[in-house]
Amino acid sequence: MKQSIVRRILVVISLLLLLLVSVGGAIAQEPVTITWWTLASAESPEPAIRAVVEAFEAEHPNIKIDVTIMAESAYGDLMNTAIGAGEGAPDIAYFWEAPWLPHTLDITDHLEADPDLSRDDYFEEYFNNWAVWNDRVVGLPFTVGANFVMYNKDVFDEAGVDYPSADWTPWDYIEIAKALTDPDKRRWGGDRPRGPFRAVWRNIGATKPYSDDSTTVEGYINGEDSVAAYTWLWDLVDSGATPTPADIEVLGTEGTGPVDLFIAGRLGMATLNNGHMITAANAEVNFGIVPEPHVPGNERFVHAWALRASIWAGTEHPDEAYEFLSFWAGPEGQRINMEIGALMPSLPSVLEDYPDAEADYFQGFLGVLNATQTAEWRATHPCWRGAVIRAVSDAWDLIMLGEIERDEVQATLDGLVEPAQAALDECVPRLGG
Amino acid sequence: MTAQERRDAKTGYLALSPWMAGFLVFYAFPILATLYFSFTQWTLVDRPVWIGLDNYIRMFTRDPLFVSSLKATTLFVALSLPLKLVLGLMLALLLNLKMPGMNVFRTVFFIPAVISGVAVSLMWIWFLQPDTGVVNTLLSYVGVQGPYWFWDLHWALPSVAIMSIWKVGGAAIIYLAGLQNIPAHLYEAAEIDGASKWRRFWRITLPLLTPTLFFQLIIELIDAFKIFTEAFVITKGGPLKATYFFLYYFYEEAFRNFNMGYASALALFLLVVIMSCTVFVYRTSGRWVYYEN
């Protein structure tokens, strides 16, 4: 009798266990949905985005990706609203604004535990500047972008000028630009930088517009090296070897550079980016690439950028979100975008398979990807872009307009210390420094 | 109140309710929220922090950009407003002529008023391009070296004002409606009395058009204070902040500098300025606006 009761109890327990396992299994198989907000572009067009989702879901049947492809004009507003509300933000998105960064998930542990991906897989400068913030890994760098000088070999040959080499100086740039300029052909030798404290500034030695601790402007914006850099700009504008801001505005491309003038042969040299590089290659322009000029003995900088692909800190599925992030911004996802779109991946092992990777100009482009980036400082000082640059833009405008003399550069910069300091003091408590 | 009056009132409120709901949700609430945010420091994505009057103190005591943007905007209003009012009226007088095919002209002149501001701005960049633009090319035919327009410190703001006449066709249509409301018998009587065309314009057309002029003045005044697109697309506030208009400053503070609290204070200040100007125009209208009835 007792044995029979024990047997029955065992059967009931076994059935219960079986039920639990099967229900548990069913729950475990319920797919998790990850929301993803993204943008379509020439580098990462919609078919590439859909292909990434399809490939990922095929590999991970337990994770579904709910992708929303947005217009760039709406993206910022929607992200601000969702992050500000504390709910409804996507699990995965580009987090490109400084105030969004505290709302990203720290993926340091996930990345360290990942057997298939590590920070060493990426270009070091891109990872350090676009994935790391306040010693936290806040995302993965998606794509690479950089500025460099493209020179039109036909224009150089016609003028009998030697091609520039990587060891050229900013003053060489002016001399070469003058030699290439031909008013009869409406041709300028080179273009002008598009803002202060970018690569040329740093290469001349003007390290930053204010102190690292974001407290002091005096001695930085009006320091010796900054004056040297602004004076170099004055010399360049005065040389008459560059197009005016009006020409660049009309013939440039969305404020990113006068690629049209360059392709038309009306500009011997231009500081452009890798998107322009492909445009020029497709237009069959005979061109080469060198890094922006620098002063021997100074560290060489490059103005470069990537998109920061991150996980929202409020995600309910951090593990699954990381699975997708590491796929999309890892080798598989970036390769899909490179093959379907025109993405230049931030992983050297994938970029080396780019269709034009063997071309001379592409090798020149690869040469700048490991240089120290201006973003190293800029990325951690949001007040430069947010407030201070506006306060100091008068010096830039005065030089561009030819409104000051060469010996007035120092005094002009001295005059900017007070408004720059005020802008910094107002901004740092808000955006950090 | 009788039962019928109560029923009428109920029907009236019912008919009014969709507009009221829209007003409360899309106007009253945002204005009140802006008022609240103007007393805070707020980056948009973090919680607003109450800072009392700090934003207003900064605005009125230690913000050079507030002063320069207000100055640029006031200058623009002073330049563009008379230009649009006078040219709009002149165009309306022309469009009021009885000529074959006039409806085509009316349509053609109205079209620019409905074209996107960004598209128009891009087009004007080309019009006023110093080297290859249409305007300077035409000027060169008569031996005049055109200025650098948007890229010249002294010409940038006038260029934006000149550009604003592009939309004058919209104003002309309103004037046209006013002109066509003027009774024809007044002109006939004046003509019989031997009044010249100029005298008829001064004594009949202009006085009877003053209600339209009054309406147009208020609309154009508000529109001029809200100048933004041209600065955003063409000049980026430059050169040397010559076109750094108030709304452009507001935009930069709110969406580039993530200073939504301060931007809210700026927005409210602009509201007060526009409202004050409107009230001033309204109060003085009794002296110059003539209503036939």
Image (cartoon, coloured by chain):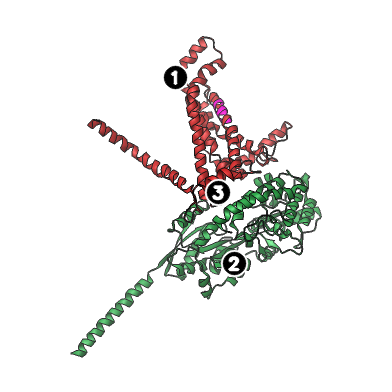
Question: Left of A328 or right of it: where is B15?
Answer: left
Query: Distance from label 3 to label 1 (Cα)?
Result: 48 Å
Task: Point out which mark residue A207 bears.
Answer: none
Chain of residue at mark 3: B
Q: Which residue is mark 3?
A: B253
Counting other residues with Cα less than 10 Å from the Cα at mark 3, is it few (<14), some (14-19), or many (20 or more)?
many
Q: Nearer the viewer, residue B31 or A334?
A: B31
Nearer the observer: mark 3 or 2; the answer is 3
- The one nearer the camera, A284 or B126, is B126
Q: Which chain is red?
A: B
Tag 3–tag 2 contact (CB < 8 Å): no
Label 2 sits on a secondary structure element that is: helix
User: Which mark is drawn over residue A127?
Assistant: 2
Residue A337 vertical position relative to residue B238 in the rendered view, above or below: below
Mark 3 and mark 2: Cα distance apart in space: 30 Å
Q: What range is drawn magenta here?
A: B83-90
Task: Identify whether A356 is placed above or below A10.
Answer: above
Q: Local crowd at mark 2 within 10 Å, few (<14), some, or many (≥20)?
A: many
Work out whether B91 lies above or below A183.
above
Query: Element type at marker 3?
Result: helix
What is the distance, in whole Å, between disc 2 and disc 1 at their CAs?
75 Å
Give the position of the C terminus of chain A as an image quadrant.
bottom right
Image colour for chain A is green
Prevalent SS, magenta region: helix
Given the current orientation, which residue lies at the most extreme top position? B193
Residue A305 drawn at (x, y percent): 61, 60
Q: Mark 1 = which residue? A: B292
> What amino acid is at disc 2?
Phe
